[in-house]
Each structure stands twice: as structure tokens, then as C-alpha cells.
């Protein structure tokens, strides 16, 4: 607990006696940073020098018309070869810019998948193999221009592989060292969207969280301090194309370091390639819109209608899809679901509540007075005993919780409900769930009846401008 990821977890845990933006009283966290200081705000994306080869991806996205629920259920789609337009569609449905809002004299860029506090700290690279219209190589995805910038030579390996990296400072600018946890949450939600897009395109999505960090850092030009590799997603079975054959152009990032994040990341570095995460199949597939329609419709619901309930299937199905192949424990706090008594359940057992009763006020308190946690029909909580995690499996657990959030989110929207990720007071969760204090809370997701319909996101190069809806806080 006094080093690596465990130390970061402890020093970035929220408790009622300290405001979220006040650093812990410990010299290992930075005390000189001011949260949300516009004079230090980092750019939305990495910046590359002119002169690198750029491929403009087709802006007309080839929607294969596959239902979101079928790929969320893991039902395979007949294999199809990949071309530039389809690879572009996959990248756009994860990391493309879909919405904007005016923000301090510039456009704030919302990506297709959500991000804690809208900080969007992730970058995505495609190490391509045999994609029609894209030379084999390592390419950075420019989600605003919908273009690939080639940053490195073709890698060794068999299958096109996406590399997701995180920039700690981009989220640390608001959340300081806790942002390292957010990078893994966000990467999980991004992977959920990239995976459904990959599956619908006719390639098997193969997520790996165990990979040789130093080699992958070299592959994409990430230094491990200002940019850190988080996960791989291969498009099909076979050896991922991650064998570096030459140096990558590093690109430009603000030189701000959060030493606790560097240490936590380093402590988990390994030198092996793990097996892909399991992708079991559900037999039950309710009807829904296509992957493309559901992904573009999704947003983070700012207001939910607490006077209305969700049907039991809108809890059972999205949760079953979200938890496919996942062994990280999850709990469900039910506020308003037909035929399920209010209370706390340990998924998948909805027959025996751990606790019954009205928990809306308590959830609101634990979620830092954010009313969504009380207005939701149900709130899902991922958590795992810290003593069972090492520096690498801690990363896996955070990433898994993010993947569950992302799939649950898509599943909810596919069935006409709405969702939002949610942060929490760490210190209060073990008692809520009746678990030992050693329980490390990973992530909350609120699912409920939408009070308004979000505007669908725009296409490549044509994001829609939104006027954001403000969420409610207690006593407002
Ligand atoms: C992991 C995660 C945690 C989040 N936590 C909160 C939260 O505590 N409160 C909240 O109102 N929204 C939360 N959000 C929603 C983000 O603010 C939202 O994703 C972001 O502003 C982008 O907007 P969009 O999801 O509508 O595209 C969270 C999102 C994610 C992915």
C-alpha cells in the first residue's frame, strides 16, 4: 500500500472531511497545482510537427447496419476485410469529435465516448496491417480532422492493433493525481465503443491489458511520464502488430509531470503479452438501433426523471451484456426498477438484496451531492479488495470497471434508457455495501429515465454544437 498503484489509490481517495480539489496532506502529491486554471489548460490533443504523411479518411462512414444489442451480446458478425473507410468508422465511433460547445473563446471538443469531467485524456494509434487504402505503419488518429498521421514505420505482427494511451496531465489539470484512475476508466469506456464498432465491422475485438509496456511506448512514441500506454485492441485473432521496427515521432505534450502517476504506472510495467480478454456470447438479444445510431445518440444524461421507473429488463439485459466475461465484483443499488425491491444487490443475484430500503439520499451524499445518483433508477458500483490486486491487476480492475460502464451505457441507450458515469467518496462505499474497508471502489454508473433527449452527435468533420444542460446538485 505504500508504493505504486496502492499508494496512489490511497492518496487520491475522497472522504467527506476533505474537498475533492484539496490535495492529501502528503509530500508525494503535488500541492502547487490549481485545479481548472485556464492559464495552464492543456490542448485537447497531441500536436505533431508538419511534414508527416497524413491520410484523410473518408468522411462518409460505412454503417454496416448491425444492431447495437447483438454486438453488445457478443454475437459474431461474418468476417469482412478492412479498408480505410471502415477503420476510420471504427476510430470515429470511439474517439471522433462528435459535439462542440463554446468554451473560454475556443471550441470544447466532445469525443464519441465519455470522459470523467470531460477531460478526454486519451490518444488512439492504429498499427495497421493490410488495411486497404492505408499503408502498413503506426498512425495517430486525429479525431477532429478524421485523419491518420503516420508517426512510425510498419510494426512486426499479424493483425491491425489499436493502442490507447493516456496523458495524465490532461485529466490531472482538473483532478490532479486522481486523474490517473480516470484515464483507465475513460480507456475502458472508449474500448467498449471501439469494440462494438470493430465487431460490427466483421473483425473479432481482442482487448489486451497485459502487454510489454516499454515496447509499446516505443511503438507510439510515448515517454511513460507525459503519455502512458493503457490497453491494446486487436482487430481479429493473431499476433498484434506491436513489434517496433523503428523510432516513432513523439509529438508534443505539455511538460507537466505528476510524479505519483509516473510511479504508479512504472510499478505496473511488465514485459509480456497477455491473452485477450474473454468475449462470451449472450443468447438473449433484444431489438435496437444500429451501433452507429446508438453510439451517436449516447451522451452523459445530465437530468434523470426520478418519478419514473425502468422495467426490470432495462436493468437485467444491459448488466448481463456489460458483465460478459468480467470477474470484477459489481453491486446494483436499486431506486426505481419495476419488480425489484429498492435496496442493494450483489450482481447477478437480484433475488436476495444485501440491504433493502430507500437509498436515494445516501447515494446522493456518497456521490458528492450529485443528484443524478438519487434520480437514477439504479446505480451500478464496481469495487474489488485492494489486497488482492498488484500494481498491474489494479490497472486491469480500473480498466474493467470502465469497460463495464461503457457497455452498460450503450446497453441502456440501446433500450431507450440513459446513463452517466459517476464519481464518489471512496471512504463511504465499503460501509454502504457491507464490505471490509479494504474494498477499493472503482467506478459508479447511474442508469435512469431521461428527462430530455440528447442531440445525436455529428459526423466526421461536422460535429454538432450543443448548449449543455446543467446537472442538479443537492439543495439547488
Ligand atoms: C468514467 C466517467 C466518470 C464520470 N463521472 C461523472 C460525474 O461524477 N458526474 C457527472 O455529472 N458526470 C460524470 N461523467 C460524465 C462526463 O462528465 C461526460 O462523459 C463528459 O462531460 C463528456 O460528455 P458526454 O459523455 O455527454 O459526451 C463521467 C464520465 C465517465 C466516462
Image (tube, rainbow, N blue to C red):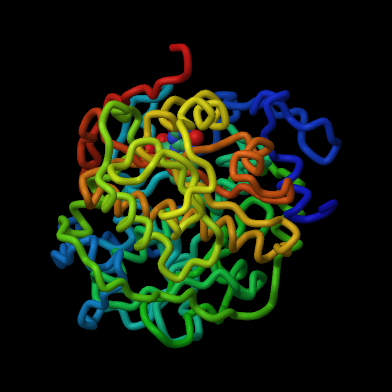
- On the image, the x and y values in percent for residue 34 come to 66, 25
Count of numbered labels shown in the rendering: 0
Q: Nearer the viewer, residue 429 or 130?
A: 429
- On the image, the x and y values in percent for residue 225 come to 68, 53
Quadrant, the C terminus: top left
Is the residue 452 above or below the residue 206 in the image?
above
Say whether residue 45 is visible: no
Q: Nearer the viewer, residue 357 or 284?
A: 357
Look at 20% across and 41% down and name the residue there: 456
> In the figure, is residue 76 to the left or right of 272?
left
Say whether residue 232 is visible: yes
Q: Nearer the viewer, residue 38 or 420?
A: 420
Is the residue 246 above or below the residue 296 in the image?
below
> In the figure, is residue 89 to the left or right of 109?
left
Is the residue 409 above or below the residue 177 in the image?
below
Look at 52% across and 72% down and name the residue there: 208
Amino acid at each position: 500500500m505504500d508504493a505504486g498503484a496502492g499508494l496512489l489509490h490511497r492518496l487520491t481517495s475522497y472522504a467527506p472531511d476533505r474537498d475533492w480539489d484539496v490535495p492529501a496532506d502528503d509530500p508525494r502529491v503535488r500541492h502547487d497545482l490549481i485545479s481548472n486554471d485556464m492559464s495552464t489548460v492543456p490542448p485537447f490533443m497531441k500536436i505533431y510537427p508538419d511534414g508527416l504523411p497524413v491520410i484523410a479518411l473518408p468522411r462518409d462512414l460505412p454503417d454496416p447496419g448491425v444492431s447495437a444489442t447483438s454486438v453488445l451480446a457478443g454475437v459474431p458478425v461474418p468476417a469482412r476485410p478492412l479498408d480505410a473507410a471502415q477503420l476510420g468508422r471504427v476510430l470515429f465511433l470511439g474517439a471522433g469529435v462528435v459535439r462542440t460547445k463554446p468554451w473560454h473563446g475556443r471550441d470544447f471538443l466532445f469525443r464519441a465516448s465519455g470522459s470523467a469531467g470531460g477531460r478526454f485524456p486519451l490518444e488512439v494509434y492504429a498499427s495497421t496491417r493490410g488495411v486497404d487504402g492505408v499503408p502498413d505503419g503506426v498512425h495517430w488518429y486525429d479525431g477532429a480532422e478524421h485523419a491518420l498521421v503516420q508517426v512510425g514505420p510498419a510494426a512486426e505482427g499479424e493483425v491491425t492493433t489499436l493502442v490507447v494511451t493516456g496523458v495524465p496531465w490532461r485529466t490531472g489539470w482538473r483532478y490532479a493525481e486522481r486523474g490517473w484512475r480516470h484515464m483507465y476508466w475513460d480507456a475502458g469506456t472508449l474500448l467498449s465503443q471501439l469494440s462494438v464498432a470493430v465487431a460490427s465491422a466483421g473483425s473479432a475485438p481482442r482487448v489486451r491489458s497485459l502487454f510489454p509496456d516499454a515496447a509499446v511506448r516505443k511503438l507510439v512514441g510515448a515517454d511513460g511520464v507525459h503519455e502512458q500506454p493503457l490497453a491494446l485492441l486487436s482487430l481479429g485473432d493473431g499476433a498484434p502488430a506491436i513489434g517496433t521496427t523503428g523510432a516513432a515521432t513523439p509529438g508534443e505534450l505539455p511538460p507537466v509531470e505528476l510524479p505519483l502517476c509516473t510511479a504508479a504506472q512504472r510499478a505496473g510495467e511488465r514485459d509480456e503479452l497477455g491473452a485477450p480478454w474473454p468475449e462470451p456470447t449472450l443468447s438473449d438479444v433484444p431489438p435496437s438501433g444500429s451501433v452507429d445510431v446508438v453510439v451517436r445518440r449516447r451522451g452523459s444524461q445530465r437530468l434523470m426523471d426520478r418519478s419514473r421507473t425502468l422495467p426490470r429488463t432495462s436493468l437485467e439485459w444491459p448488466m448481463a451484456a456489460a458483465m460478459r466475461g468480467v470477474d470484477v465484483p459489481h453491486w446494483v443499488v436499486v431506486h426505481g426498477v419495476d419488480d425489484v425491491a429498492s435496496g442493494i444487490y450483489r450482481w447477478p443475484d437480484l433475488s436476495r438484496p444485501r440491504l433493502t430500503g430507500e437509498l436515494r439520499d445516501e447515494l446522493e451524499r456518497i456521490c458528492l451531492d450529485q443528484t443524478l445518483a438519487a434520480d437514477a433508477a439504479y446505480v451500478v458500483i464496481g469495487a474489488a479488495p485492494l489486497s488482492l490486486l498488484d500494481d498491474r491487476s489494479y490497472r486491469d480492475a480500473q480498466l474493467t470497471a470502465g469497460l463495464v460502464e461503457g457497455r452498460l451505457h450503450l446497453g441502456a441507450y440501446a433500450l431507450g434508457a440513459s446513463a452517466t458515469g459517476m464519481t464518489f467518496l471512496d471512504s463511504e462505499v465499503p460501509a454502504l455495501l457491507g464490505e471490509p474497508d479494504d474494498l477499493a471502489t472503482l467506478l459508479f454508473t447511474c442508469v435512469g429515465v431521461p428527462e430530455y433527449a440528447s442531440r445525436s452527435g455529428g459526423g466526421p468533420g461536422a460535429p454538432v454544437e450543443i448548449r449543455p444542460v446543467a446537472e442538479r446538485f443537492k439543495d439547488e
